């Protein structure tokens, strides 16, 4: 009995800590859609959220379809949701796999399935005018991969759901997309699939027309969160790498024009469906931690999503008693997790994401936990290339080659694209020609078309001059090469003469360039006339006499080969060493230009300016990081201006998380406030003198 009393006391303490000290805010709110999925526990979830609501949050709770037939809606449930408040809305679950069975069994179209689902929504009390709508649970992995007719099926389904049978108003709805695990996935394969999907212009046009909210299931693993020695802001960065990865990839620099439609749509529709499902060993990630760790994890996910600045947050809620608790203990502890979920949303509605961590600290630790860092790859776009997949040709002059195959690849992964690809094939030999048929017609440069949905193409080559020409495949400026062999007929010998020495190849330059916090070095090979040469080189980067990176490969048509160090840029001097160079028909002179690149200072950035309220006064925080996004302890001076007048100012040193905060003494009055960093200094760092523009307005 004493243990039960102690447990109840602990749960009550947590509930009190996460509950807001005052009623829901009516001013200074950051509007947000909060979307929730669960398979059965919708009533308890909605009631728990309504016990601590935010007036600037619209809550959307999924009403699961009937278990016996998941094409049938649950009567009367929407009315129960409306009774909780005007900002509570019901989402009618459109179970994708069940409606797939309906299409197969009835012979009707996917469009007809959408129309029928809207009819059943109306019949069971879902009210579009009151803010209810539909949600497709879930777009399968075949939609992401573009398998068969999967994408066309869901396009027809959401169009039918949007239009209905004409007796209801047209209504955009939501989708949940099936997720992948936070760790243990093949990032190159998954990223290649995502990049191809983002270029399907017809798909994203339909999403823009018929779907208002696009939620990715990102059910994280607590063991990738609760890492010892990692501060809350760094944890949030790791979380957002996973939570926001579709949006980060859509926004990545270097994406092709075909991706613009997906980027524009996701900028206005994307939301993460994060993980509040305790205590699972799989399916919803791993959450079999104690309930206090789970409450901390839920708070940290809210912190991360609020920090990302989007207008949508989401959670899956499906508690499972997998850790041997009594029914009473399990229900009490699950209630504490739900209280933390509602409280973290409410406490952050004024614009200060750190308030989510006020009760738990966002600092729980699990033995053996390790961050999943691979999601940073989605902040950059991997270009698709056309790669020669057939062996180098060896043929006699004037004869046509056998078939030469090129394959579309993204990051080394074979891929197909939903748009046509134009590959230009050329040769370094002036007498080399190409054709799509072994009988011609032949051309010095071949425009090779790869239709949508195909990943390979075939060509033929011939050359009237012997040698080792380099064939190039150029796809959108990305060039891949292969060295071939053209054999000239043997010439009769008369007098043996001493062959002339091969012309020299030399390293013309070694150029160092900082790139996004890392050091890049590039060599160029030229002949005696300064013309670029293509050959194979081995290049090593050295920092203070230690080898830190090395690569071997062929130079591009400009004679260049680059190497970027994986480790971040650090203080000290760097140099490059050429450890091998081979160019067909040339002899390297073994000379390397003297080279050195010394880093005396590193860049410092003002990464974040955050506004919030604390005891009725304005609370402002400034966070400083290095070029890799890691926090810096620096001396900072900043002022807060209201209109044209200085409202408050401070000078001090940022803490271990990079933050310096100020709570202004004057009370808040109506108007708009902004912060200006006037100075920033840290040993061995130079401020880039840039600062985020952030305003906080009180009405």
Image: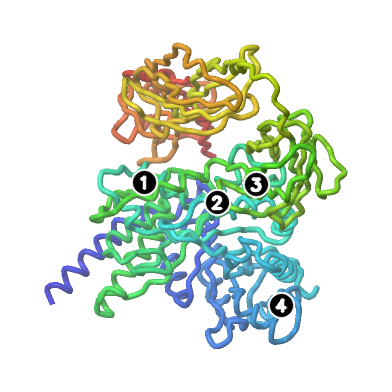
Which is nearer the eye, 19 or 74? 74
Q: Quadrant of residue 144?
A: bottom right
Q: Are marks 1 and 3 in contact (CB under 8 Å)?
A: no
Number of numbered discs overlaid on the protein picture? 4
Distance of label 2 from label 1 (alpha carbons):
23 Å
Dot 2 or dot 3: first in sequence order is 2
Distance of label 2 from label 4 (alpha carbons):
31 Å
The residue under label 4 is: 113
Which is nearer the eye, 86 or 599? 599
Of helix, strand and loop, which one carries label 3? helix
Of helix, strand and loop, which one carries label 2? helix
Distance of label 2 from label 3 (alpha carbons):
16 Å
Residue 651 appears in the picture as rendered: no
Dot 3 or dot 4: first in sequence order is 4
Distance of label 3 from label 4 (alpha carbons):
29 Å
Which is nearer the eye, 264 or 367? 367
Q: Are marks 2 and 1 in contact (CB under 8 Å)?
A: no
Distance of label 1 from label 3 (alpha carbons):
26 Å
Dot 2 or dot 4: first in sequence order is 4
**Point 42% across, 21% down: residue:** 577
| Marking on residue 191 | 2
Distance of label 1 from label 4 (alpha carbons):
43 Å
The residue under label 3 is: 263
Dot 2 or dot 1: first in sequence order is 2
Of helix, strand and loop, which one carries label 1? helix
The residue under label 1 is: 235
Q: Position of residue 138 (x, y in %)?
A: 58, 69
Q: Position of residue 334 (x, y in %)?
A: 33, 70
Q: Position of residue 37 (x, y in %)?
A: 50, 68
């Amino acid at each position: 009995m004493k243990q039960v009393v102690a447990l109840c006391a602990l749960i009550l303490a947590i509930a009190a800590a996460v509950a807001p000290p005052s009623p829901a805010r009516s001013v200074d709110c950051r509007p947000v859609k909060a979307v929730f999925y669960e398979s059965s526990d919708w009533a308890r979830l909605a009631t728990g959220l309504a016990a601590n609501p935010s007036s600037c949050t619209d809550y959307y709770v999924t009403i699961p379809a009937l278990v016996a037939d998941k094409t049938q809606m649950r009567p009367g449930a929407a009315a129960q949701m409306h009774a909780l408040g005007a900002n509570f809305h019901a989402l009618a679950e459109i179970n994708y796999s069940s409606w797939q069975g309906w299409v197969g069994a009835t012979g009707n179209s996917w469009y007809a399935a959408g129309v029928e689902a809207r009819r059943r929504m109306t019949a069971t009390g879902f009210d579009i005018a009151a803010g209810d709508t539909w949600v497709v649970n879930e777009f399968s992995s075949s939609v992401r991969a573009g398998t068969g007719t999967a994408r066309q099926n869901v396009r027809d389904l959401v169009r039918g759901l949007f239009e209905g049978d004409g007796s209801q108003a047209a209504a955009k709805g939501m989708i949940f997309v099936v997720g992948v695990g936070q760790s243990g996935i093949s990032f190159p394969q998954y990223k290649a699939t995502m990049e191809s999907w983002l270029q399907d212009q017809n798909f994203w046009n339909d999403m823009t027309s018929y779907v208002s909210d696009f939620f990715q299931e990102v059910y994280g693993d607590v063991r990738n969160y609760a890492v010892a020695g990692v501060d809350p802001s760094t944890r949030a960065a790791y979380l957002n790498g996973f939570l926001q990865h579709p949006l980060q990839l859509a926004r990545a620099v270097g994406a092709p024009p075909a991706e613009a439609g997906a980027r524009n749509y996701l900028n206005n529709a994307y939301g993460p469906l994060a993980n509040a499902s305790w205590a699972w060993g799989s399916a919803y990630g791993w959450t079999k931690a104690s309930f206090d760790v789970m409450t901390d994890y839920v708070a940290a996910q809210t912190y991360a999503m609020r920090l990302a600045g989007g207008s949508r947050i989401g959670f899956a809620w499906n508690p499972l008693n997998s850790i041997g608790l009594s029914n009473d203990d399990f229900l009490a502890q699950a209630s504490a997790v739900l209280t933390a979920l509602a409280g973290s949303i409410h406490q952050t509605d004024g614009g200060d994401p750190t308030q989510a961590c006020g009760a738990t600290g966002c600092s729980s630790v699990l033995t053996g936990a390790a961050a999943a860092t691979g999601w940073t790859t989605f902040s950059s776009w991997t270009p698709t290339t056309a790669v020669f997949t057939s062996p180098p040709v060896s043929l006699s002059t004037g004869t046509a080659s056998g078939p030469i195959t090129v394959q579309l690849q993204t990051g080394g992964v074979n891929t197909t694209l939903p748009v046509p690809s134009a590959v230009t094939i050329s040769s370094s030999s002036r007498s080399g020609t190409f054709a799509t048929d072994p009988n011609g017609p032949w051309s010095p440069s071949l425009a090779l078309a790869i239709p949508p949905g195909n990943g390979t193409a075939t060509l033929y080559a011939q050359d009237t001059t012997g040698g080792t020409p380099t064939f190039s495949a150029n796809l959108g400026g990305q060039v891949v090469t292969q060295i071939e062999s053209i054999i000239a007929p043997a010439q009769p010998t008369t007098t043996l003469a001493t062959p002339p020495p091969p012309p020299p190849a030399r390293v013309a330059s070694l150029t160092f360039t900082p790139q996004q916090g890392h050091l890049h070095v590039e060599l160029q090979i030229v002949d005696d006339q300064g013309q670029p040469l293509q050959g194979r080189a081995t290049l090593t980067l050295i920092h203070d006499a230690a080898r830190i990176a090395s690569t071997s490969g062929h130079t591009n048509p400009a004679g260049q080969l680059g190497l970027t160090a994986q480790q971040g840029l650090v203080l000290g001097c760097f140099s490059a060493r050429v450890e091998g160079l081979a160019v067909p028909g040339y002899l390297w002179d073994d000379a390397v230009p003297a080279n050195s690149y010394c880093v005396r200072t590193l860049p410092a950035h003002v990464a974040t300016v955050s506004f919030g309220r604390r005891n009725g006064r304005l609370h402002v925080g400034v966070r400083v990081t290095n070029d890799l996004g890691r926090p810096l302890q620096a001396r900072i001076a900043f002022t807060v201006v209201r209109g044209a007048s200085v409202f408050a100012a401070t000078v001090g040193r940022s803490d271990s998380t990079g933050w310096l905060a100020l709570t202004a003494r004057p009370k808040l009055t109506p108007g708009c406030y902004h912060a200006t960093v006037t100075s920033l200094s840290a040993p061995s760092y130079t401020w880039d003198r840039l600062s985020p523009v952030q305003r906080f307005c009180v009405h």
